Image: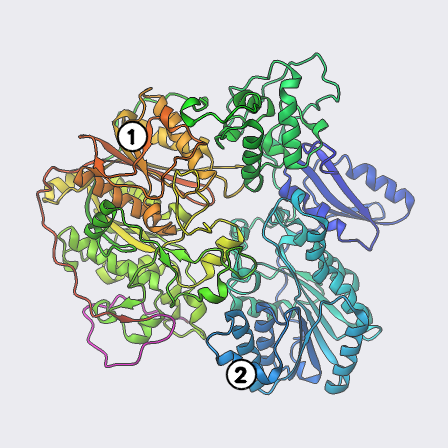
Amino acid sequence: MLTANPRIGLRCVHVSGAERSALAGFYRSLSGEFPGVHGRTVRVDGGTAELVAAVRAETSAADRETEIRYAGARRRRPVAAFAPASNGDDPLADLGRGAVLITGGLGGIGLRLAAHLADRGARHIVLIGRSRMPVRNQWAALAAEPSTDPVLRTRLTALLALVERGVTLTVRTDALDDVTSLRRLIGRVRKQAGGIDAVFHCAGVMDPPASFLSRTAEEISRVLRPKADGLAVLWSAFGPKPPRLMVLFSSVAGAIPRLAAGYLDYAAANTVLDDFAAAHDGESGCAVRALRWPLWRGVGMGLERTSAGGGLGIGDLDGNEALDLLDLALRVPGEPVLLPCRVERASLAAGELFLAPSRTAPAERAPARPVPAVPSSDNSTGTLPDAAGETPADSAPDTAADLGWLTTLVARTTKVDAALLGPDTLLGDVGVDSLLMAELVRDLEAELGHAVDPSLLQEHPTLAGLADALGAPTTAPAAGPADRRPARAVVTEPAPAPDGRPTPIAVIGMGCRLPGAADPAQLWDVLLAGRDLVTEVPADRWDIGSLYSPDGGPGRSQSKWGGFLDDAALFDPEFFGFDDESARQLDPLARKALEVSVECLRDAGYREDEVRGQSLGVFVGTRTGNHRAHLQPPTRQYTAGVNQNFVAAHISHFLDLTGPNLVVDSACSSSLVTIHLAAQSLAAGESSMALAGGVDLLFDEEPYLMLSAGKALSPSGRCRTFDESADGLVPGEGAGMVLLKRLADAQRDGDRVLAVIESSGVNNDGRTMGHTTPNGRAQRALVSDVLARGGIDARTIGYVEAHGTGTMIGDPIELQALTTVHRTHTEDRGYCGIGSIKSTMGHLLSAAGVAGFIKAVQILRHGRLVPTLHCHRPNPRFAFAESPFFPVTRAMDLPPGSRVGVSAFGFGGTNAHVVLGPGTPGEPGRPPLPLPVYRRRRFWRLPAAPGPATAPVRSARLDLTLS
């Protein structure tokens, strides 16, 4: 249906009676992945006349409803509403009367649930899972053996804990596809325990996100089987005597179409559970509840993923939060389907949750005109606005035959009927997102015989425009990069700078802890020497032997390399006023942020007591770490130790600072965004000085598993920025802070001026071909705006520290965006060096922006460009020889008087760009102070050995009294 019809304005209506199949879930969620499709499911409780009337009404309905029910002539729709207070009977109060059965019981959520039910009184628990288990008399030995697979060791430890608590445990490996075998198991358990009191259906499979059109029938069936088919087998096995309580672990992805993109099969499987609960609640005395869970962080499917639910006001749940909500949800009377979550009522648009996404301008265009099977003589085309509201400089080919090759290729890649593709068809409207873009580029290169710049797909979004930009296929040898001028995109000339240019901001101090570099001076030495600081994962992070697999896969990392700190585990609690237990509870992210902040002040020549009480702002880019997962059960110090906002709050508390205090999380751009926000705060006068930067640590395997699930990691373990062999990013960790001050104030106060922020800016990609696909147009607009507001001629930029992650798509898009901006200022070639610190030490995630910023300041201070590593053969998808840029692969002089640009682009689309000018020659002024002398000890997962407390200099701990 989706491949045989235009996807713009297509109406897909599934009609059924009271019993709906899994197909209804696919229809209901279609609009989440295909914004131009109106998908809905309609249930009709009535006869033929009512059915005909309902079909007529719903096939022409223009609203955004995704689920409708007709009771006679009455049309009803589901509405999200807050449940009443949980004042009903507690169905978990009498679990000891019989056994409890958990499907998916050997998974992370199943085991957490089993422990919780044991807390609630369950004495006999039956766990059904897919994982093969060793014989029980080997459990203890394997759990204690260091070489045991960590996943198995964790599972065995949880099972042994249940046994030690006196729980009678039955463990069964079963795929939930044999009703006879399951019926025998239920009969045996009933005899042993006197009955089965409750069933929790937690079984489920969730594949990595992929376009629905690329899924095979077997892949879809694999996802549907454990949830949908497994539930049918389970219910049948109980026969006429179901349990008193059946709880179905459904997902918010099945409830909210916008969360189903890339997971339509999983959403459909969970819709089956919801429908089952609504249909069977109360049958034969069994209370059936479907709980539409958000993602559980760090457990089950949350080990490898985060979700987009937070953008709708429904955040991921900590495991303990989820279990608390389980108890509350089961006490809500009369509601078979519930969505347990923690939300701020004012920020949740409940009326929007179940609706199809609002259709933006691209999805509202008229359907593309099909190409006739026999080319007609009418070759005229219309011009439609592109995604940014501009008119593309695209023209149709001279004949329909010129477009035929591209139509065939796009149809093959996207699995769309070629007859539905016309000259004005937009790539995004036929499913070209971040998942298909790389595949389409490869197919184009194979057809054309030369490299293709991925940004062409964004700059020329229609088939006609793309065909014109690409030219006709050829079997001739591929042209070299120098033989192809980059496509010229339509760009507006930068507007003149306003009368008041941005307030110049001086960089007066820096501190960092980066792979192979304990301070900015060491960083400069390793960059100048061209050292590769990427290593294998240290043994104290995670077990390479059991978790690394070059091919990836569930629960496996496709990389075993990264940029790591030697001292990530070390901390001096006495210096910062912590006792040992508080230091153990304190997130390592906060520890490193404290250290580099103090060192940054010292580098600027300021003692800690000199800034006390000042309106000095603190702006820290970081993400929520998973230190909390290793601190169970929580103690009193837990809240101020692990919550994200305290990474910055501890700095202001320790130094007694009264300026703004913010934590920023815009993913990879976080720490460069903080520098922009700090500059704005200084310009507005709300801060007298500002500490800005970021921190990120690779505490354990979690980031690797998540990035591997998305196929984002370099399997070769090297970040090959701008090289033709670029194959993905390499994770890294680090911390960096810079001290900023208005330039006039710094000159007045006698500070050293290391460099000057002349202009900066932040924007967002908006809607792109996918959440992780960069938007060249947005990057271009940002850089152009930053230059224009600063009154800066691009020809004066001698070097750009690029985001440059070493990916096939991202690097050429960034280069093309920069080229287009510079071409509005000059046609000169090869005058601006470009590189990325990521090639040296990996992608430092939240700290990536500040690492590149400190490198840029050092380049200005020393007047030298340093090599970008692993760029041996520049990417042929970008014509360097025709551009303003050249990759810096060896040390060389920076042209005198040059400015330096720094870019950082985040997952989710937040982009930041900063332009730096040189500081005061010779750097006269307040000299740096000696760095602190720490007495650091190891605080890493396990508590350190207790020792005598030392009187603190000043406490950085925030004591919370909760009432």
Q: 221 above or below 360?
A: below
Residue sticking out furthest to the front? 477
Q: Which mark is residue 832?
A: 1
**Residue 136 percent across, percent down from the top left:** 61, 83
Residue at image position (26%, 33%) is 502
Residue identifier under label 2:
140
**Residue 437 percent across, percent down from the top left:** 55, 37
Quadrant occupied by the N terminus:
top right
Spatial CA span between label 2 and label 1: 63 Å
Q: 649 above or below 333?
A: above
SS type, badge 2: helix
Residue 614 appears in view: no
Residue type at mark 1 is: Cys
Residue type at mark 2 is: Ala
Residue sticking out furthest to the right? 48
Q: 215 above or below 546?
A: above
956 sits to left or right of 931: right
95 sits to left or right of 195: left
569 vs 242, nearest the viewer: 569
